[in-house]
Image (tube, rainbow, N blue to C red):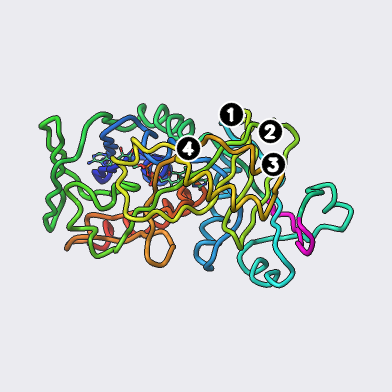
Amino acid sequence: MTGPRIVIIGGGILGCTVAARLLECEPQARLSLVDQGLIGGGASMYSAGVHFPVGRSERVRRLSGASADYYQTLHARHPQLPMHGFDFFVAAGSADAEQVRARCAGLRPLSAEERRQVMPELPYGQEVWRMPDCHAMDVQGLAQWYARRLRERAELLEGVGVEAIREHVDGVSVLLSSGRSLAADAVVLCPGPWANEGCWRELTAALDIRVKKVVALHLQRPPEHGHALFFPVEDAFLAPLPQRGHWLFSYTCQQWDVTPDKCRQARVEARELDEAREALRGIAPALAQQLGSGRVFCDAYSPSREPLVQFVGRHQRILFAGAGNGSGYRLAPGIAAEALALLNHALTTG
Ligand SMILES: Cc1cc2nc3c(=O)[nH]c(=O)nc-3n(C[C@H](O)[C@H](O)[C@H](O)COP(=O)(O)OP(=O)(O)OC[C@H]3O[C@@H](n4cnc5c(N)ncnc54)[C@H](O)[C@@H]3O)c2cc1C
């Protein structure tokens, strides 16, 4: 017996997770995963891989919780995965406490003594809570780990671009830069920040995705025994990255409508350092001067700031999954589960 023929376009963390989860629940599927570059070499390569249970909407909190469970089970089965758990705390002024409790799952308030230990230099008037189930992952490493295992059961095509997609009532054909054409029952489109590029731009236009620069700065500070801090009002976090031996400060850069191919050439600029120092000054002033380098790329953002999982095109055969909104790693297993449920429904009822 043979299963459906599925082509996944985009071998970032999302495309790889969809592929892995598809073969978990549909072992007979005939799967091709295509990436124009190397697996995990898009936005996933730049990701800080920080996971924490936060979401502005009920759906995002659910996706985040489902993903945390998935990663914990995966790590328990494969302890060699590049995943490091740490304590993660949320800090905000008392006036914002209610909003914080609504956005972050499973918070526990800290006593005054615990608070002093966590961050003695925290500005006056800040409350601190502990968040459960937080970790940092080498996201590119995880994508490559998935890929190594997928190669035994699926066709992985790297360095091969998708040049045309033609949808018919009973299938899709995908034309590759290598000249080959793949016939599929369905395509899952996971293009990350390339959502508005290439041959699918007309299909995705109605999704109103915008691409924003994402900047995270590195702090030369030993990560051992460190705990991470999330500042929801500023939408910023400080986290140790034990796998890389330094800390990271992520703040919200507001440069919109960039393209991934241009962002490949982007470097940390003085303006970004100034913005980040300004953001850090209000939170942990002593650390502001340690910022000097970091990582710059971009991500796809939806109008609702929730990930998008929906069919594009006319025949329910091309499923878009993406718009990570800067959280595409920590939501990937949940997004993949939603994508597979929709795909399964379309293929069994179509
Ligand atoms: C600096 C930075 C820090 C971040 N930190 C975090 C974090 O701490 N936690 C978190 O959860 N998220 C974080 N993110 C966001 C997260 O990294 C992204 O949301 C996630 O990696 C997106 O994964 P993806 O698989 O959708 O996209 P990608 O990883 O970009 O994968 C898309 C793939 O599609 C391929 N592709 C594009 N066009 C074609 C074509 N024509 N043919 C074939 N293949 C094609 C690309 O080559 C690419 O590999 C961060 C992002 C950045 C930039």
Task: Assign a secondary structure to mark 2.
Answer: loop
First in sequence: mark 4 vs mark 1? 1
Few, some or many C-alpha atoms within 10 Å of disc 4 (few <14, some 14-19, many ≥20)?
Answer: some
Which residue is pictured at 68% across the width and 50% down the height? 229
Do labels 2 and 3 touch, CB within 8 Å? no
The numbered mark at residue 262 is none
Do labels 2 and 4 touch, CB within 8 Å? no
Which residue is pictured at 64% across the width and 57% down the height? 231
Q: Which residue is mark 2?
A: 223
Q: Amino acid at mark 2?
A: Pro
On screen, residue 267 versus residue 122, left or right, reads left
Say if disc 4 is inside 8 Å of ligand 1.
yes
For residue 78, which quarter of the picture? top right
Q: Which residue is mark 4?
A: 295
- Between the C-alphas of marks 2 and 4, the distance is 18 Å
Residue 194 percent across, percent down from the top left: 29, 47
First in sequence: mark 2 vs mark 4? 2
On screen, residue 83 versus residue 272, left or right, reads right
Q: Which residue is mark 3?
A: 86
- Chain part drawn in magenta: 123-132
Do labels 1 and 2 touch, CB within 8 Å? yes
Q: Which residue is mark 1?
A: 244
284 and 105: which is toward the camera: 284
Q: Name the chief secondary structure element in magenta.
A: strand
- Between the C-alphas of marks 3 and 1, the distance is 14 Å
Quadrant into which the N terminus falls: top left
